[in-house]
């Protein structure tokens, strides 16, 4: 696998700025991962989520809860829905498509700023041991893109604006996320000063993390070599800067 091919192994959903806002808007970003960074084979690993002002999240949460109640669902989980398991084991394709269509519509209407990165693990493992050691973990690669995207949202706002970040709590990843966040914020990135606090929660308890799960899952599916799924088409409409992350930047540690 050459450098040209490797250049297309990571994609990113960058973010647009809230240029029209010139007051404190209290930005919050929610992120979740899809896949496992230690998984064998080609399967991709992704981290994705959304950034929006707090007032939008408050409306979004109420609408998302209303839709869950309408479909008699306690907690949305993209993998369960795709596999017709858990709460969705008795569903049919028509009901699944209707449900997903409404949820994606809510994200487009109230959030409108998806952020994320996805990496095929087979490409990562084709790097030399020295390169892999320098990058630490696929989770770090994707997470750095997400933190940069979240910080960019605040960068176009007044200097005092910060973005608060919430991650889905996952075994083995909390410590990694916290360490990278503090490094990023403490001078490891030019935009690190735009990050506020970090916290961890369960998607079952924090509704916006369910939207993050949706984005992360669709990012992972976007590079599996199949025809583009319509949810990703909708997410790309929300963000025209969907693009490949240059391989050179990966080796430079962003």
Image (cartoon, rainbow, N blue to C red):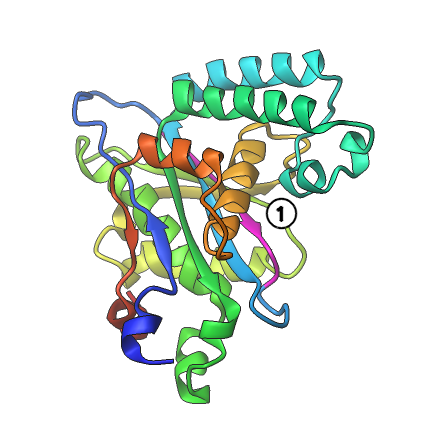
In the rendered view, does 51 fall on the left or right side of 43? left
- The question of residue 32 being in magenta is answered with yes
Seen from the viewer's position, the closer of residues 223 and 248 is: 223
Can residue 153 be seen here? The reply is yes
Residue at position x 55%, y 50% in the image: 33
- The image position of residue 127, as x and y in percent, is 42, 82
Q: Quadrant of the C terminus?
A: bottom left
- The image position of residue 219, as x and y in percent, is 47, 48
In the rendered view, does 131 fall on the left or right side of 104? left
Residue at position x 51%, y 43% in the image: 218
Q: Mark 1 = which residue?
A: 169
Q: Which residues are magenta?
A: 27-36
**Regarding mark 1 in the picture, which secondary structure is present there?**
loop
- The image position of residue 214, as x and y in percent, is 54, 37
- The question of residue 116 being in magenta is answered with no
State whether the magenta stretch is mostly helix, strand or loop: strand
């Amino acid at each position: 696998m050459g450098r040209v091919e490797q250049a297309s192994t990571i994609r990113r959903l960058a973010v647009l700025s809230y240029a029209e806002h010139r007051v404190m808007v209290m930005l919050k970003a929610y992120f979740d991962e899809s896949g496992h960074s230690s998984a064998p084979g080609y399967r991709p690993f992704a981290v994705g989520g959304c950034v929006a002002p707090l007032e939008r999240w408050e409306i979004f949460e109420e609408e998302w809860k209303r839709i869950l109640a309408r479909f008699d669902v306690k907690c949305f989980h993209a993998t369960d829905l795709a596999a017709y398991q858990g709460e969705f084991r008795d569903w049919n394709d028509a009901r699944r498509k209707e449900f997903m269509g409404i949820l994606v519509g809510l994200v487009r209407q109230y959030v409108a700023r998806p952020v994320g990165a996805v990496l095929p693990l087979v490409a990562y493992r084709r790097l030399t041991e020295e390169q892999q050691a320098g990058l630490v973990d696929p989770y770090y690669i994707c997470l750095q893109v997400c933190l940069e995207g979240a910080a960019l949202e605040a960068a176009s706002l007044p200097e005092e604006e910060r973005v608060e970040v919430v991650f889905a709590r996952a075994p083995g990843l909390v410590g990694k996320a916290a360490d990278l966040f503090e490094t990023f914020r403490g001078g490891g990135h030019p935009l690190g000063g735009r990050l506020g606090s970090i916290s961890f929660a369960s998607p079952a308890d924090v509704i916006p993390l369910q939207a993050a799960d949706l984005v992360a899952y669709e990012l992972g599916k976007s590079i599996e070599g199949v025809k583009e799924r319509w949810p990703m088409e909708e997410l790309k409409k929300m963000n025209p800067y969907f693009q490949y992350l240059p391989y050179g930047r990966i080796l430079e540690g962003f």
